[in-house]
Amino acid sequence: MKRRDFIKLSLTTSLGAVAPLSLLDTLAPGAAHASGNANATKTPTVCNMCFWKCAGFVQQTDNTLWKITGNDADLHCQGRLCTRGTGGIGAYTDPDRLTSPLLRVEENGRQTFKPVSWDQALNFIVERLNRIKENHGADRIAMFSHGDGASHFRHLLRAFGADSDSHPSYAQCRGPRDMGFQLTFGEGVGSPDRTDMANARCIVLIGSHIGENLHNGQVQTFTRAIEQGATIITVDPRFSVAASKSRYWLPIKPGTDIALLLAWMHVLIGEQLYDRDYVTAHTRGFAELQQYIRPYTPEWAYTETGIDPDTIRATAREMGKAAPASLVHPGRHVTWYGDDTQRSRAIAIINALLGSWGREGGFYIPERVGLPQYPTPPYPQARSSWRDFTHAKYPLAHHAVTNTLLDASRGDDAHYKGWFVYGTNLPTTMPGIREQLKQAVDQQELVVVIDVQPAEITGYADVILPECSYLERYDSLRDSPERQPSLALTMPAITPRGDSKPGWWIAKQLGERLGLGAYFPWNDYSEVLDWQLKQVGSSLQEMQAVGHKAFPRKTARYFADDEPRIFPTPSGKIELYSSTLKDNGFDPLPTYTRPTAVPSGFYRLNYGRVAAHTFGRTQNNPLLYELAPENVVWINPLIATEFKLRSGDYVRLKNPDGIISNRVRVRVTERVRPDSVYLPHGFGHTAKGLRLAHGKGADDAALMTRPAIDPIMGGTGMRTNVVTILTEGV
Ligand SMILES: Nc1nc2c(c(=O)[nH]1)N[C@H]1C(S)=C(S)[C@@H](COP(=O)(O)OP(=O)(O)OC[C@H]3O[C@@H](n4cnc5c(=O)[nH]c(N)nc54)[C@H](O)[C@@H]3O)O[C@H]1N2
Ligand SMILES: Nc1nc2c(c(=O)[nH]1)N[C@H]1C(S)=C(S)[C@@H](COP(=O)(O)OP(=O)(O)OC[C@H]3O[C@@H](n4cnc5c(=O)[nH]c(N)nc54)[C@H](O)[C@@H]3O)O[C@H]1N2
Ligand code: SF4
Ligand SMILES: [Mo]
C-alpha cells in the first residue's frame, strides 16, 4: 500500500469571454495606443504568463480588472503584450484557482484534501521540517521550482540549511545551449536571449519556431529583421510560422542538424567565408577544426539530412556574406535528441566563425542593473547540496539537474526526505519519470506544493499552499541581463482571491515559525523593494508610478574591433576546440551521431508551442481556453490517406510502451513530413480540478517514455519518442 494515493483534486465553475489571435497580430498594442477609459486606474505589473517578463499595466475600474496593456518604455515588449499576456486577467478570474491551504487527510479509509487554516498548514510544515532536521539534517530538503517567485522559498531553505534547488528550465529546456555556449565563449546566452536580431542581415533558425514560440520582444526584433530585408534561413522538419517568413526553408530529416552544421562549417572554412581577423584574434583550435571538418562535405550531409548540397552551399554563402551581422540562433528549448550540447557547440562554433559574438547584428553584451540583496544574516553551510548529486554524474553542469535530485529522493536510502515544489508541474514537465516520481514522493516525509491552481503535481502533495497570482502580489524586481539595463515592478493590482497569499508572505511565516525571523527582518516585502531601489537611485514610489525604469549602460554593447579581449574560458580565447570536453572524456569537436531509425508503422513524435498557451499552465485560464481549448495532431496527407483520416477526425496516439493518449483531433497538412507527427505541448490534463482543461486534447509528455539523456549535462532529450496512430474506437 502506497503511503500516498494520487489524488485528483476536484473543485467547483463558470466561464468568461475574450480576445482575437493570429507574427505581430498576436501582440496587442500598449497603453498609449489602446482605447482609453478615463476612469481606469493603472497599476504596474510584470507579466508572469511566461518567463519573458514583459512590463505592463493592469487597468481597472471599481476594483474590477479591465485589461492588461504593455509598457511602452520596456524593450521586452515595446508596449505590446502577446495573447497570453492580455489573457492574464483569466489568471485572476479562473474559478478553479486554489483559494485555501489544503492538507492531505484520511477520511473513512480514503485519502483526500481538506481545507485548513494557514496556521494549521504552516504549523504542519514546520513540525515536519523540524523532524527531518532532527532525524536526518536540514540539508535533506530538495526544491523543484520554476520562476522568480521561487526566490522567497530558496531564501527560506538556504536559511534553514538546505541548498538543493533545481529548475526544469535547465535539464528540460536551455541547459545544453548554455553549456555549449559556455564551453565555447565562457558565457551562456541568458534570458532574454542576447541575440541582436533587429540589426542582423542574416538569421538562421535551427528549430526555434518564433511566431509560435511567442517570446514577445524576440518576435518583434525578428519581424524588424524581416522588414529590413534580412535573409532568414529556417531549418525545421515542419513548415513552421517562421519557415513561412523565410527565404530558405530547409525541411531537415529530424535529428540530423549536427550533420548540416558540420557541412556549413566545411563551406564557410573551405570557401574562406569566415571572419579571418576575428578568428585569428579571438579563437583557439582553428587548425584542429579545419582538419576535422574536411570530410563533412555538403554531399555527405545530403545523405544524412536530405538537404541538397546546392542549398547547403547557397545558405552558407548567405551567412558568410552578411557576417558579422549574421547569427545562428542558439534556440531555447534544445533538449531534443541527447546530443544537444554537441549541437549547441556546433551552433556556437559557426557564430564564432562568422565573428558574430559580441558584434552588432550578432550577439550583444548584456548588462543588468545589478540590484544589491537586502541585508540578512549569512546562510549556514549546508551539509550537502545539489552539487553532490548533479556533479557526481555531470561534473560540468552549471545548475542542478532535476533528474539527479529526483533520483536522490528514491529508494530506501533516499537522501532527500522532504520536497518543496514551486510553480512547476513535474509530471508533465519531466518526461519519462512518472514511475520514479511516485517512488520519490513515497519516500518523502513532507511534500509541499505551492501553486495557483490544482495542477497534476498538487495530487502528490501533503500540503498544498495557494499562492495568489502575480496580479495580486509584490514580487522581486525584474533585473534581467539585456541590451539596456532596466528594472520593472510587480505589485498588487487587486486583493488576493479567497485565502490565497503572496509567496513572500508564506516564506516569511514559515521562517518565523522555524526561528529564522532574522532572515525576514521586514513587515512587508514592499520594504525590501524600496530599500533595493534606493540603493540604485530610485524608490518604490517612483516605480509605482512608472512601472519600468531604464538605466544607462556602464559598458559597451559590442566589442571594440581593435581591443584585445579575454574571454572567460580556461584559455581566455573562444574555444573552437574544447579541452574541457576532452579532459572530461567527451568529444572536443562536435560529433554527429545518426539518429536511431523510426520503426516501421511508427512516426517520430514532434512537439512545440501554440501561441495562445504557455506550457501546461494556461489551458484552464478561461480566456485562453476560449482561444485554444485543445490541441490537434498534425499528420501528413500520405499518412492520412493510409489511415483514411480527414482533418477534424479523432485519433489516439500509442507509444511502443503501450501508453495511449486521450483522443485528439487530426489536422491533415503538408506542413509536417510523413516520418513524424506534431503535437503541441501542454494539453490533455488529467487533474480533475482543472475543469475546463481536464481531458481536452492529448498530452505529449505521457507519450515520452523513452527520452535520451545528454551525457554532458544531463538534459532530457524528448524528440527520440515515436508513436503509432489508433483509429478504432475513438
Ligand atoms: N506561445 C508560447 N511561446 C513560448 C512558450 C510557450 O509555452 N508558449 N515557451 C517558451 C519557452 S520556455 C521556450 S524554451 C521556447 C521554446 O521554443 P523554441 O526554442 O523555439 O523550441 P524548439 O524546440 O526549437 O522549437 C520547436 C520547433 O522545432 C522543430 N523541430 C523538431 N525536430 C527538429 C529537428 O530535428 N531539427 C530541427 N531543426 N527542428 C526540429 C519543430 O518542428 C518545431 O517547429 O518557447 C518560449 N515561447
Ligand atoms: N513533454 C514536454 N515537456 C516539456 C516541454 C515540452 O515542450 N514538452 N517543455 C520544457 C520547457 S521548454 C520548459 S521551460 C518546462 C516548463 O515547465 P513548467 O514551468 O513546470 O511548466 P508548466 O506545465 O507550465 O507548470 C507550471 C506550474 O506552475 C504553476 N504556476 C503558474 N503560475 C504560478 C504562480 O504565480 N505561482 C506558483 N506558485 N505557481 C504557479 C502552474 O499552475 C503549474 O502547475 O517544461 C519542459 N518540459
Ligand atoms: S511574451 Fe507574452 S506571456 Fe510572455 S511575458 Fe510577454 S506578454 Fe507575458
Ligand atoms: Mo523552456
Image (tube, grey):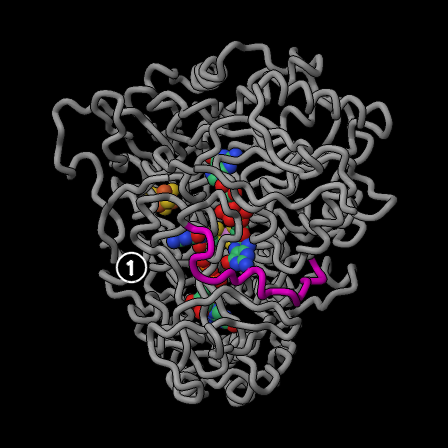
Residue 34: x, y in percent?
A: 16, 38
Q: Amino acid at mark 1?
A: Ala
Identify whether 633 is placed above or below 74.
below
Position in image of residue 325 (x %, y %):
37, 60
Indicate left or right for 596 with 423 as reference.
right
Q: Is residue 44 left or right of residue 288?
A: left
Q: Is residue 576 visible?
A: no
| Residue 718 in view (yes/no) | yes
Q: Residue at x 76, y 46 (%)?
A: 2
In the picture, residue 462 is in which quadrant?
A: top right
Q: Residue at x 43, y 46 (%)?
A: 691
Residue at left offset 33%, top offset 66%:
241
Instruction: Give the image location of residue 359, x and y in percent.
Output: 42, 54
Q: For the point 38% across and 23% down, which residue is it?
A: 491
Vertical position of residue 121 compared to residue 512: above or below: below
Question: Picture coordinates of residue 237 (x, y %)?
Answer: 44, 75
Q: Quadrant of residue 581?
A: bottom right
Residue placed under numbered mark 1 in the picture: 225
Q: Is mark 1 within 8 Å of ligand 1?
A: no
Q: Nearer the viewer, residue 247 or 296?
A: 247
Tally of numbered discs: 1
Q: Is residue 328 left or right of residue 89?
A: right
Residue 337 higher or lower than 432, as above or below:
below
Q: Residues within 10 Å of mark 1 (few under 14, many from 20)?
A: many
In magenta, the rendered stretch is 693-713
Residue 237 included in the magenta stretch of the image: no
**Helix, strand, or loop for circle 1?**
helix
| Residue 706 lies in the magenta stretch | yes
Prevailing SS of the magenta stretch? loop
Q: Residue furthest front?
A: 108
